[in-house]
Amino acid sequence: MKRYPPPPPTGESACEPRQTRRRIPAFHPVPVGPRRDGWVPERQAAFIGFLAHTRSVCAAARAVGMGRESAYRLRKRPGAAGFAAAWDAALGKSHQPVDLASAKSTGLDAGYRAEEGLIQVVMERGRYAGTYWKDDNNALLQHLARLDRAGRRASDSGASLHRVKPGGASTPGRHLARA
């Protein structure tokens, strides 16, 4: 008895192979030093895109001009939880969802998350098409709330946030107790 594959769903060509659609979650870039030849956020996003396209860590690292070992080291760095989740999703593995709004989940400070934003990798028909940046408004609100609490604590303790120098210039961050 011959077994035939099931017919394709309506709207899909019989000649085109059916591909499962992978959604790569947005992630915060891993904090790295200020080297142009290192793992800058644009290179991290391109690596995840090429990883989803090729399903090979070695090929994706080569495509962005980096080494396989450095990619694995980047994945293990502090603050790389979102990057690791995007890595797993790009390879089609199951992964723990990362709460991008939590400093405990991401390992990143709210100030850093607000400044850097989120990277979203765009895939079209199984190929890496590009990336776009999204503002992380939740992290911005968390950071502003933290600054507001710090300002209230300073004003409640009687300390001034600015010290006025002779001539009218002020120096932020230096606290003076009132007499």
Image (cartoon, rainbow, N blue to C red):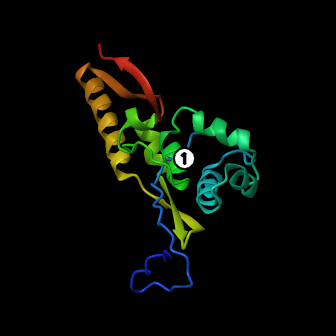
> Could you tell me the amino acid type at mark 1?
Pro
Q: Residues within 10 Å of mark 1 (few under 14, many from 20)?
A: many
In the image: residue 154, left or right of residue 70: left
Q: Among all residues in the image, which is located at the extreme top? A: 179
Residue 153 location, quadrant: top left
Q: Disc 1 designates what residue?
A: 29
Number of marks present in the image shown = 1
Residue 63 position within the rendered picture, expressed as x and y whole percent measured from the top left? 73, 58
Q: Residue at x 44, y 80 (%)?
A: 8
Residue 110 locus on image (x, y percent): 41, 39
Residue 90, position as x, y percentages in the image: 54, 55
Q: Quadrant of the C terminus?
A: top left
Q: Is residue 59 visible?
A: yes
Left or right of 82, for residue 128: right
Mark yes or no: residue 32 visible: no
* Residue placed most toward the observer, 94 or 141: 94
Residue placed at 58% from the left, 33% from the top? 77
- Residue 53: image quadrant is bottom right
Q: Tell which of 3 and 113 is nearer to you.
A: 3
Q: In the image, is residue 93 above or below residue 142?
A: below
* Secondary structure category for the residue under label 1: loop
